[in-house]
Image (cartoon, coloured by chain):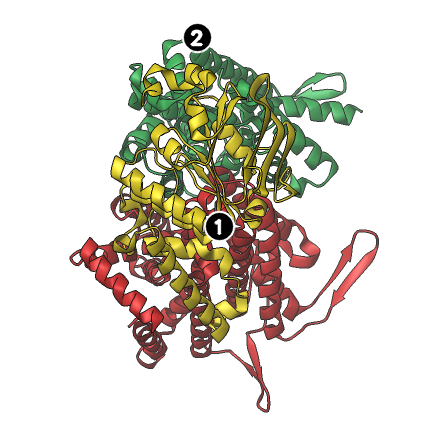
Chain colours: A green, B yellow, C red
Amino acid sequence: MSEFLQHLVNTLVLGGTYALLGIGLTLIFGIMNVVNFTHGVLYTFGAYVMFIVVHQLGLNFFLALPVAVVAGWILGAVIELTLLRPLRGSDIDTTMLVMIGAWIAMQSGALWIWGGVAKSVATPFPEAPLVLGPVSVSWLRLFVLAAAGLLIVVTYLLINRTRLGCAMRATFQDEDTASLMGVNVDLIYTSTFAIGSSLAAAAGALLGPVYVISPQMGDLAAVKAFAIVILGGLGNITGAVIGGFILALAEELGAGYVSSGYRDAMGFLIIIAVLIFKPTGLFARSERIG
Amino acid sequence: MGSLATALKVEQVAVRFGGLVALSDLNFSVGEGEIVSLIGPNGAGKTTAFNIMTGFLQPTHGTVSYRGITLNGLKPPEIADLGLIRTFQRTSVFPNDTVFDNLLIGLHRQGRTGLLEAILGLPRARQSDRRLRQRAGELIEWVGLQRRAYDPAGSLSYGEQRLVGVALALAAEPSMLLLDEPVSGMNASETFTFVQLIRNIRDRGVSILLVEHDMPMVMSVSDRIVVLNYGRIIAEGTPDVIRNDPAVIEAYLGQGAVHA
Amino acid sequence: MRSVVTILTIAAFASVPLWLRDPYLMNALITTGIFIIAAMSLNLLLGFTGQLSLGHVAFFGIGAYVSALTSLGFDVGLPGGFRVVHDPWPPFAGFVLAIIISGLCGYFVGRLSFRVRGAYFVIVTISFAEVVRLVALNWVELTQGPLALTNIPPMALSLPGFGELALHTKLQNYYLVLVVAVAAYLLITRLVRSHFGRAMRGLMANETLAVSVGIDVTKTLTLAAVISAGIAGAAGSLYAHYIRIIDPEVFAFINTVTMVIMVITGGKGSLAGTIIGGLVFGLMPIVLRPIMAPEAQWIAYGGVLIAILFVLPRGIVPSLTQRLSRPHGKTAAVGRVAFAEHSAKEHA
């Protein structure tokens, strides 16, 4: 029983960052109809920004997170402006392949710059975990959960309470009508991609110190993000949050009770099962975006 | 309709989308070799009725049968197998292929050679292919598109694309054709030619159900007309009867059309 | 005309070992050839049914593992206390089994994944490949996991009356790959020109209309998936017996991407394009190796993929043929004459 409780606590911590990853991807997928294969690289990028700020610039750990968010935002905007805007109106396969090209180039770039050796980030948190009865959780993971929660709430408010968010929701429903109503669709696309990218970078910056940082770390993260998006339904933010926690639970239980070698297979199996049995995702259409 | 054997029969069909009633208690039939038109104002339920009869939608209640076989639960290809073939309002061609290749694709069901025969190019497969090519040529001639046979179908005018659509439907050797607004977007002379084509198709023994907006065209070509409004049949009869039916005039044709 | 070009091309490829003696280049040509076979099979899906399958490497890898395990033998315990013991069979049996089992996998994956389209289809196919990779990594008793299957015997042909001929040399393997590539090329070409191929084209261009003229979507797409997977399995088998060592990395997503790049570069729906695209990308590392670090080569790879999508979105061969045929585009009058000629020919 206590083992199960421990799994639940781990799920909660992991699920928060997964949700963050999923929200970024589901926004881009839902609003722009782009399958963003660079999402994982943005995650990697966020983690390296964390590493650079803390170890190479010697700045504060807590400062690194906002820096990663801003850096992810800028990189995302650059990708959108240079690679996606010229291809507006192309079919989804073309943009998907362009994103694959960008992903290969950027990941190889990371490997070239930082090398293949995994790096770890020192954190200001105590080594000893917080023990609460039968379960224990590290302070670092608690911080990660809190930060992820904060970012999710901020994103939710951004989309539901601001003019930009309103325009994003309008574009999601009908791009043509939105543009007739005076929404600057180009701006919305760039903002969406930048926001989605900054969330991926934030997830990387948060999880990087928990595990280790390497150029390939983003690949699995990207797959997990896809699983979450598919679980939650296209463009559905609430769905992505719930999907993040479901994936985390499936992984925890799969690793705990089946075999840890298959932990990472859970995401793929969920994708296959959901798409085959309930292709619209687990949550109803009416819930999408806001 | 009395003397004709019934081809298509729609009995007590109702369709609801959630709380919205799209069709209620729809009853009508099309006799063998008959041209029947389904008309009605926008939103009257014409397209819904059309989709029910072609298996793209399942009715909430009631049955549709063709030559005594119930269509409920059958998928579009199975309905096509019965000889009931439809055309589409918008997407009537394979745009990147030539008209000739369009027809070859459309003749798919006639070209049933085995996979191995086809890959090895055995005599039987080649012979079958020759037959298909000849048939494609005949169909193109039938709808009068010889001049455009080797142009990409997507480059044809709207009216010509409709003709390709009809030729594609004919390729399946239908015993009944369901035409979804075939002359919308055609000019007067194209429409005139099209009416001749429809009559010609009927004369070869194919029953026809037409869903159409163009009143003069419907009046000139139909044996019988069924008028829908708000998902119900409000009138049914020959063009002359419909032309003078007060309910139809009020609900649909409007004042101007009475004198048309 | 077409067949003359085909025969000349085959002759040109067959003559390569006569003037090219460099073993390093021969090796590059053989592995490139194997990848071209796999890429051609991917083109059957991508270019003729329009389905962007990004899990294609799964069939390649399954073919490699099936063939390797058939020729190496294995002894595996199954749940419930059963043991499956398999004694080594000749590599050629492995080749045949690789085609059959990959084809079967293609059937099941096709039946499941063709329920969804577009982005969803892409993601299902990637997921399938990754699940297979994780199985290969974790089912150590069967696959040796990350330790790799080693000492895979070279492909051997048993000729009646001549005994068994093991293909050890690069020269032998080059011709083996060439023969399989030609067979795959002819198979796919014949298929897409048959009425099965027309059904595929119809589905790709306008699925609703195709259904209405009686084309069976599931059957047509599944047929393409089975043949495509079978050919990829054959390529995987060639790979296993040529390289003679395989590990789960054979399933890496990047291998699918390599095939996709070859197809896209040459042009979707053009097998000649796949051969050209395959040669360009297969031999590019040889040109780049002296001047670039491996990471930089990969950056170039990604960059070239993007550049091609921007500059030649339809691929090299379709863009070229379009440019060449434009001067004598058919007017209505020419069309009429062509039609008359055609009818005359048919009625003769």
Q: Which residue is mark 2?
A: A161
Pick the residue in front: A149 or B61: B61
Q: Around disc 2, counting alpha carbons within 10 Å, would you say few (fewer than 14), some (14 to 19), or many (20 or more)?
A: few
Q: Which residue is mark 1?
A: B205
Q: Nearer the viewer, mark 2 or mark 1?
A: 1
Residue C257, how many percent across, how many down?
Answer: 43, 50
Pick the residue in front: A66 or B81: B81
Q: Amino acid at mark 2?
A: Arg
Image height check: is B120 above or below A136?
below
Residue C309, how many percent across, how many down?
Answer: 31, 45
Image height check: is A125 above or below B139?
above
Placement of the N terminus of chain C among the 4 image quadrants: bottom left
Q: Of the numbered discs in the image, which one, if any, rests on residue C206? A: none
**Subunit that carries the residue with mark 1:** B
- On screen, residue C63 versus residue C50, left or right, reads right
Image height check: is A43 above or below A112?
above
Residue C344, how many percent across, how many down?
Answer: 30, 69
Q: Around disc 1, counting alpha carbons within 10 Å, would you say few (fewer than 14), some (14 to 19), or many (20 or more)?
A: some
Badge 2 marks a residue whose secondary structure is helix
Per the model, the C-alpha gap separating discs 2 and 1 is 64 Å
Same chain for the residues under marks 2 and 1 in the image: no
- On screen, residue C337 versus residue A234, left or right, reads left
**Do we see residue C337 in this rendering?**
yes
**Do we see residue C45 in this rendering?**
no
Count all numbered tags in the image, as a single digit: 2
Image height check: is A195 above or below C282?
above
**Subunit that carries the residue with mark 2:** A
Placement of the C terminus of chain C among the 4 image quadrants: bottom left
Q: Amino acid at mark 1?
A: Gly
Badge 1 marks a residue whose secondary structure is loop
